[in-house]
Amino acid sequence: MRFIIFHKTNARWEAGEVPDQGLIADVGALIGDLTQAGILRGADGLRASSLGARVRVSAGEVAVAPGPFAGRDKMPAAFDLLRAATLDGAVAWAGEVGRALGEAEIDVRPVTEPWDIGLGAKPAGITSRRFMVLRKATPETESQRGLAPSKREALGKLRTAQGAELLASETMRPSARGRRCKNTVNGVAFTDGPFAESKELIAGFVIIEVGSLEEASRWGARYVTSVHSDEADVLELEAPPAGL
């Protein structure tokens, strides 16, 4: 079983601050332990929402609002990782996702690269960057049935859009199958789903492959303390689409 563990942003990261050495060391130790355990399947952080855009699609019409933007009490439902030359290219992809669904709210934000936070120089010749295109949950996605087959088929046909290259695609199972980890004065406390999103945006995530929600939650407790966050969510992931 694959799970995503993600934590929420705060005013520091939204202001563009870079992690201090203590946080970098703690996250590095976590990633090292996940790698050594053979269960790490992915990990990334996200830049401030001021560097992104929010895309809303309704009845085929696309509206784009530049960042910064705030959370809206909605759980994430799925995301694509893209490589695009510009934010506009990633926004164009988000518009195509929205049209495939008919109705959608989608956040587009750059993925944090090591050189963004002072960990080495940007390699020469890189003229594009990675973006996360994050789709919000709806009553349909939070149901046990999930998206209608016709919408899944339409999404599955998306591979390129105005210069954006699809790198990975992930879909979360309903939050009723998940667990929330909260840092408290008495240690990490757990709350079973379903749950509504808090008003913070995602700051970063890891994807792991383990045998159960209980095992994923143990890593969630380690994660929420390692990233110096108040809260992290653990959600089960669907099998990735064929070809990715």
Image: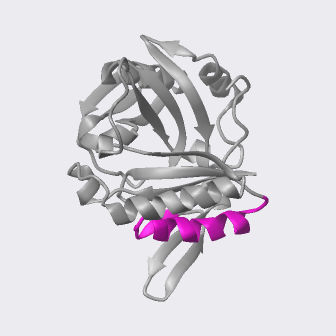
| Left or right, residue 154 beside residue 116 | right
Residue 152, position as x, y percentages in the image: 66, 27
Task: Relative to 207, say whether 165 is above or below.
Answer: above
How did the renderer colour the structure? one colour
Q: Is residue 59 visible?
A: no
Image quadrant assignment for residue 168: top right
Is residue 89 covered in magenta?
no
User: In the shown orientation, is residue 123 left or right of residue 156?
Assistant: left
Start and end of the magenta stretch? 211-232
Residue lying at the far top of the rendered structure: 162
Location of residue 196 in the rendering, given as x and y in whole percent from the top left corner: 48, 60
Quadrant containing the C terminus is top right
**Depth check, front residue: 42 or 6:** 42
Task: Name the residue: 70% across, 42% down.
Answer: 238
**Whole-percent x, y for residue 160 in the image:** 52, 14
Residue at the bottom extreme? 186
Which residue is pictured at 37% across the width and 31% down the height? 56
233 w.r.t. 143: above or below: below
Along the viewing direction, whichever of 199 and 17 lies nearer the viewer: 17
- Please tell me in which quadrant of the rendered image residue 55 appears: top left
x, y percent for residue 74: 44, 51
Query: Which secondary structure dominates the residues rendered in magenta?
Result: helix
Q: Do we see residue 19 in this rendering? A: yes
